Amino acid sequence: MATTNSNKMGWELKEIILVAMCCIVFGVVYLVAVYLSSFINTACTPMGLGFLGNELLFGVWFMASTFAAYILQKPGVALVSEIIAALIEVLLGNMYGPMVIVTGFVQGIGSELAFAAFRYRRFDWSTMLLAAACSCIISFVWSFVRSGYGELAVPLLALFFIIRLASSVLFAGVICKVVADKLARTGLLKSYALGRAHE
């Protein structure tokens, strides 16, 4: 279902509070995913697939941006949510430190661009999946530059991208939309754009 956001470009206090709550929840989820991916990476290293854990779970780290943006349907929500969730992840003890915030910025740009492409007037399956895919693409370019993905053989690089794309679509696209829609149908989000669209 496509919806149209309100004409207000600014954020109301209740929207700021919702973003903060989403970021806290996803900051914790992100940190759990970091340690789970590390475990998978360690298990896969003897097979030469040490990056696999990251790719399988990569879509998890886009969820704050698509989830919050889908609910509020306003400019800037995707980018700000991803940055704050990354900040919270760092404050909770992410082993990679402040660079995670930069990565959050990069990832948030991807989903923000997808929603901006429709002028923040369309929030449906197409835009959610596009947002997930855009985050995947931009994050993969970032990984290519920063994490040495350029040293991987082309077939392995292609495999990693396909796995990351599938993970992105599943977590940041499908799961976020389904969960948000279910919350909206309960009436919990009636004060927000998504909730009004389900009335």
Image: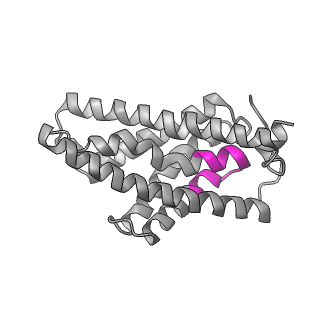
Q: Which residue corresponds to the image point at 41% horizontal and 33% vertical from the top-left?
A: 165
The one of 28 and 75 positioned closer to us in this rendering: 28
Q: Is residue 2 left or right of residue 138?
A: right
Q: Is residue 37 visible?
A: yes
The one of 158 and 32 positioned closer to us in this rendering: 32
**Which residue is most to the bottom?**
91
Residue 175, image quadrant: top right
Q: Which residue corresponds to the image point at 74% horizontal and 38% vertical from the top-left?
A: 121
Q: Quadrant of the N terminus?
A: top right
**Which residue is most to the right?**
199
Q: What range of the chain is rendered magenta? A: 66-81
Q: Is residue 76 magenta?
A: yes
Q: Position of residue 166 (x, y in %)?
A: 42, 31
Reply above or below: 132 against 33.
above
Q: Is residue 80 visible?
A: no
Q: Which residue corresponds to the image point at 68% horizontal and 31% vertical from the top-left?
A: 124
Q: Is residue 110 left or right of residue 20?
A: left
Question: Principal SS element in the magenta part?
Answer: helix
The one of 13 and 109 positioned closer to us in this rendering: 13
Q: Position of residue 122 (x, y in %)?
A: 71, 35
Q: Is residue 120 magenta?
A: no
Residue 178, image quadrant: top right
